[in-house]
Image: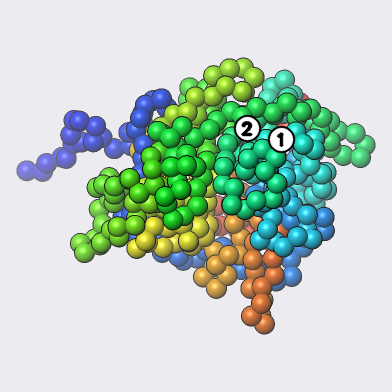
């Protein structure tokens, strides 16, 4: 007769969902990363060397829209608003990280953007530069900005200073005949620092060979429990080199796969913390949602959408941050689960969703997926026909994805910098 296989007891059931406060962490395994293959469904189209730039004033890279707590881009009194890391366009493109400021842009057609300047008053933010984050409009019309306070306070331009903390400031948005401006953002608060147990501290990372992360807060409300959380990029707590690659992290690799000894230094994770007060300043660190230990050191700018009842967790990663013995393109990676803390499975078997074309491996980066399945990113380095390169520092064509359960497809290429709002304030 026929036998039906039932999941056994003891927690081996499929699509497990856990309390956000529990300590279950999903893994992006070496076995999954070994499945990475590029094809038309997951390779970004080539960007020509002549592309439009949004402004001559600043380089633009990591970008995010003004969002509601429900993760939807929102227009304020008719204006689309986006935020981006910016640096003066007259410095070398590669030096931009050490002088980053959050700038803002506004538009009525969601694709021709006017640069509005810095979001924060001069000298008000923590750190020596402002790295990526998120900006949320709440029901009372307040704007809550979350960012990475990168470097020591008043540390100056110092590429060797890798300190990262998460910070918050509150302000208000205004519109007049000329466009959009902001007030407030004078009082900043450090809302999280790596604790060394769940999330590696800078000091613990120093024995490791590769760059460290505690950054990129993404704030949202979980539609299931209606609580407010922030995702961020971290590394697993503990001194670099003290981690061990276990079976959960390695996964079901083909026979003969050797895990190089140095893979233990690679400990990227998608961290999470929960809000504890009404003014967005008190947060509690929770165990990571996803660990890429032994697979990848960096799971940058993590963010989330909830689509057809499933939780899609997105992150960006680089070829050079894969652990030894693995590789994959710079680009967007995704995972799907049935709840905020769940048994996330890599999309398409490997996690790869959109990778750069192999002949333009640094073409664009910092993909950000919105609940309408549009993906914005910035142009990084485009190869030219004569063997040179042109630096972008401006937004790339927006791409559109289709999702079905644990599969994704690139289905369309839309205009440069197209970031339409999905909802309007006042609502
Ligand atoms: C991604 C990123 C972010 C960081 C910023 C620094 O492109 O590395 O993780 O906040 O850029 O410039």
| Residue 313 percent across, percent down from the top left | 48, 42
Q: Secondary structure at mark 1?
A: loop
Q: Is residue 117 left or right of residue 405?
A: right
Task: Identify the residue shown where x is 66% and y is 73%.
Answer: 389
Label 2 sits on residue: 167
In percent of the image, x 80 and y 35: which residue is there? Answer: 121
Q: Real-space Cα distance between discs 1 and 2?
A: 8 Å
Residue 402 spot, x, y in % from top left: 52, 51
Q: Is mark 1 within 8 Å of ligand 1?
A: no
Q: Is residue 126 left or right of residue 401?
A: right
128 vs 357, nearest the viewer: 128
Q: Residue at x 69, y 22 (%)?
A: 139
The answer to which quarter of the image holds residue 34 is: bottom left
Q: Quadrant of the C terminus?
A: top right
Q: Who's the residue at 30% across and 57% down the image?
A: 261
Q: Mark 2 and mark 1 in contact (Cβ < 8 Å)?
A: yes
**Dividing the image into 4 quarters, which one contains the N terminus?**
top left
- Element carrying mark 2: strand
Q: Dot 1, how many residues are within 10 Å of its Cα: few (below 14), some (14-19), or many (20+)?
A: many
Whether residue 322 is visible: yes
Image position of 139 (left or right of 181): left
Q: Examine the rendered structure and indicate whether residue 85 appears above or below residue 257.
A: above
Label ID, residue 310: none
In the picture, the disc for residue 125 is 1
Furthest residue to the bottom?
386
């Amino acid at each position: 007769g026929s036998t039906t296989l039932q999941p056994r007891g003891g927690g081996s059931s499929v699509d497990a969902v856990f309390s956000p406060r529990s300590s279950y962490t999903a893994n992006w395994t070496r076995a999954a990363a070994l499945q990475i293959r590029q094809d038309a469904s997951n390779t970004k189209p080539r960007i020509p060397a002549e592309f439009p730039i949004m402004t001559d004033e600043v380089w633009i890279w990591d970008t995010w829209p003004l969002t509601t707590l429900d993760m939807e881009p929102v227009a304020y009194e008719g204006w689309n608003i986006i935020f981006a890391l910016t640096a003066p366009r007259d410095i070398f493109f590669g030096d931009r990280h050490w002088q980053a400021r959050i700038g803002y842009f506004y538009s009525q057609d969601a694709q021709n953007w006017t640069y509005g300047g810095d979001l924060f008053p001069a000298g008000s933010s923590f750190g020596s530069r402002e790295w990526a984050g998120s900006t949320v409009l709440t029901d009372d019309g307040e704007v809550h900005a979350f960012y990475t306070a990168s470097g020591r306070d008043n540390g100056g331009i110092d590429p060797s200073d890798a300190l990262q903390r998460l910070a918050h400031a509150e302000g208000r948005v205004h519109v007049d005949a000329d466009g959009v401006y902001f007030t407030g953002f004078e009082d900043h608060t450090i809302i999280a620092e790596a604790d060394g147990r769940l999330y590696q501290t800078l000091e613990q990372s120093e024995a490791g060979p590769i760059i460290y992360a505690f950054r990129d807060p993404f704030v949202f409300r979980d539609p299931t429990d209606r609580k407010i959380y922030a995702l961020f990029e971290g590394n697993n707590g503990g001194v670099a080199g003290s981690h061990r690659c276990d079976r959960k992290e390695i996964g079901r690799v083909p026979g003969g796969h050797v895990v190089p000894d140095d893979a233990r230094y690679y400990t990227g994770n998608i961290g999470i913390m929960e809000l504890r007060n009404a003014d967005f300043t008190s947060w509690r660190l929770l165990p990571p949602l996803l660990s890429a230990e032994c697979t990848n050191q960096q799971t940058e700018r993590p963010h989330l959408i909830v689509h057809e009842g499933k939780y899609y967790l997105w992150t960006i990663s680089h070829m050079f941050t894969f652990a030894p013995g693995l590789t994959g393109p710079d680009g967007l990676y995704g995972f799907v689960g049935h709840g905020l803390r769940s048994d996330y499975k890599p999309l398409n078997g490997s996690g790869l969703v959109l990778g750069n074309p192999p002949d333009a491996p640094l073409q664009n980066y910092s993909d950000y997926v919105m609940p309408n399945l549009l993906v914005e990113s910035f142009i990084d380095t485009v190869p030219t026909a004569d063997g040179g390169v042109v630096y972008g520092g401006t937004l790339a064509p927006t791409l559109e994805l289709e999702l079905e359960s644990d599969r994704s497809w690139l289905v369309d290429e839309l205009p440069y910098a197209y970031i339409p709002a999905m909802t309007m304030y006042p609502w």
